[in-house]
Amino acid sequence: MPEGTDPDKVLGAVRALAHAELSDNHDYVLALHTDTPRPHVHLTVQAEGLDRTRFNPRPVQLNRFREGFARELRARGVAAEATPRRARGQGIAGSSMALVKLRARLRTEGTRQITQSDRRTNDQAIAVAKGEDQLPPFIAAGTFRWQEIRRAYEQTAAALDATGKAEDRELAKDVRTFLEKHQGMNATPEVFAAHHARIIAADRSKAALPAPERTTKYHGPGR
């Protein structure tokens, strides 16, 4: 949470969320950390539940957790909202900390070696650019979701303009500025594939160009 947030309220919100979502099937433990200016709580859940099913929350469930956490914070007087990353213009979540640190170490060592994860992404992107493979399904789903979000923002901006109020028109202007700044939410595989597609297209264009005609210089009689 941001600096200055009451740590006890953060802990209370997490405790209430964990009780509502987990207590009927999973044991768990909470740990409040105040060693940094941003108070935060670690929630560790026992993997195997009382009914022998494993704790494996999917995106829909994780989003419900986030919304529940924000709701519990608001109930304690802490301003909080739970919005999807795409609605905030952030796209797909970044790489794991382990992968980020590995990339940094390779850069520090000055090696041309890349991580296996990046190699797989790059190889798949080349195959996609050549028409030999397709992007993962989550890419298309994310693109569709972003288009839905854009339409919702555009409709909101139009509704704000229609009120005739100066403050609403300013807010509509801010919404449109946000949309201009975030034209697309391309994931790394999309970016890589588009990059290789441009290279392949450029190479094909060069190959299609006719070879320049060779000209013979005249050196005069007897030469």
Image (cartoon, grey):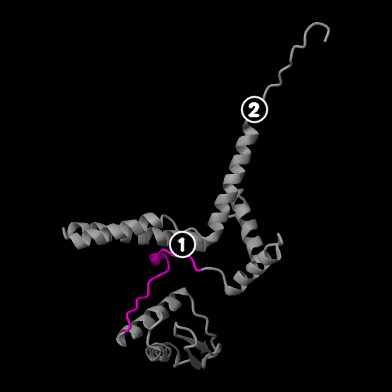
Q: Residue furthest right?
A: 222
Res 162 → quadrant: bottom left
What residue sits 55% from the left and 87% below the top? 47
Name the quarter where the C terminus is drawn.
top right
Viewer-side label of 2, 1? 2
Rendering coords of residue 30 (x, y %): 48, 92
Which residues lie in the magenta part?
78-93
The chief SS type of the magenta part is loop
Q: Is residue 199 above or below residue 14?
A: above
Asked whether residue 172 is in view, the answer is: yes
Q: Residue at x 38, y 72 (%)?
A: 83
Sequence-first disc among 2 and 1: 1
Q: Quadrant of residue 116?
A: bottom right
- Amino acid carrying label 2: it is Pro
Task: Identify the residue position indicated by label 2 in the image.
Answer: 210
| Residue holding disc 1 | 141
Residue drawn where x is 21% and y is 57% of the image: 161
